[in-house]
Image (tube, grey):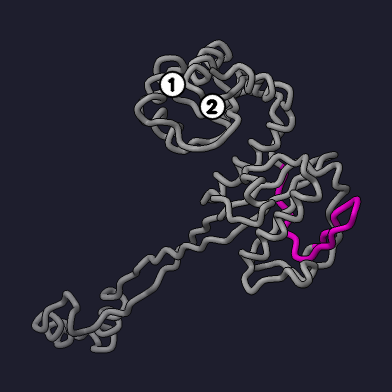
Amino acid sequence: MADDDPRLRPRTGATLLRLRQGHLDIEVFPPLLMKLAGLYRPDAARVCAEGSGILLDNLDPTALEAVARALREHGEPCFVVPAAALVPLPPEHPVAHGQILKDELELRDTAGKPHGGPWNKAIVLALGELVTETQQVKHRTGSILNAKMGYGAMMGSVSGGLALGAVLGGVAAGGGTRDTVTHTSRDLTLDLVFLEAPRRYRIESGHFDYSLLGEQRAATGEANLRTLARWFLYTAPHMATNVDRELLLAGQRPPLPRLHGPGFDGMVRWLINLVRFRKEAEAARGQTA
């Protein structure tokens, strides 16, 4: 595989899409990707561990067709499309209020700006835990008692004409330490995508007005967002989703992915393109051994 970043190449290659997400067997699939697609071992292992729906992007079409055949032989449904034909990911628009109507979903952001669209144009519902990491630098002031300058050296500096205040100031400035603390938060997040100049709306569990749920409103944002997702899928069952819809519609708690930002965005883009290539996806189901 070439050393240059495939994301920066002209999109003249092909892309391999799976019909499901999830880790690929680390013993079985990396050797296939190394042999058929020319991936280096670390790259092949990473691709299989991430288990993205868009498995390989913008690589040699002949090589990816060979990979797709091998994956299907191992029971992994997938298909190959031109890389240039993939639908790009629209930016997310956070929303904080909503109203579910028979024919459309009305949404508003925190500034009151209207969003949403008709249900027959809703194509994707993605639900999962979005992991966010922020770093904070904390300063700890040093003490003259643990300063590196010895007593004799300090007294010598003072007797040599250096002001004691300057010495102590240097100890405070030089003896301090900086600690970097990483804070991790996990927020249940829902993305809805509508057609016609694709629009993506984001609902975060702790930043939405759930009064529209009425008597079904629960005590936590996570429970409320699951209920809202169930309502959305019931109203627009044609939407592609990463959720086990049968479990969700039955009021149960299906397992949900836990993803950082790029992984969550990749999941949404994968679902959009499963809709874009619906015919190819259906054909891939029939080809899987």
Asked whether, in this view, residue 172 is left or right of residue 39, the answer is: left
User: How many C-alpha atoms fall within 10 Å of the one at disc 1: few (<14), some, or many (≥20)?
Assistant: many
Residue nearest the observer in this picture, 216 or 197: 216
Q: Quadrant of residue 120?
A: top right
Residue holding disc 1: 33
**Secondary structure found at label 1:** helix
Query: Looking at the picture, which amino acid does disc 1 mark?
Result: Leu
Residue 63, image x, y percentages: 52, 13
Q: Is the magenta stretch mostly helix, strand or loop?
A: strand
Asked whether, in this view, residue 100 is left or right of residue 41, the answer is: right
Residue holding disc 2: 56
In reply to whether residue 96 is colored magenta, the answer given is yes
> Visible in this render: residue 209?
no
Q: Do the residues labelled 2 and 1 touch (CB within 8 Å)?
A: yes
Residue 121, image x, y percentages: 84, 42
> Visible in this render: residue 185?
yes
Residue at x 73% of width, y 68% of height: 216
Q: Residue furthest left?
A: 152
Residue nearest the observer in this picture, 43 or 53: 53
User: How many C-alpha atoms fall within 10 Å of the one at disc 2: few (<14), some, or many (≥20)?
Assistant: many
Residue 142, image x, y percentages: 27, 79
Query: Looking at the picture, which amino acid does disc 2 mark?
Result: Leu
Bounds of the magenta segment = 90-108
First in residue order: circle 2 vs circle 1: 1
Dividing the image into 4 quarters, which one contains the N terminus? top left
Query: Vertical placement of 31 versus 197: above or below?
Result: above
Q: Residue furthest front?
A: 250
Query: Vertical placement of 211 versus 127: above or below?
Result: below
Residue 264, image x, y percentages: 58, 47
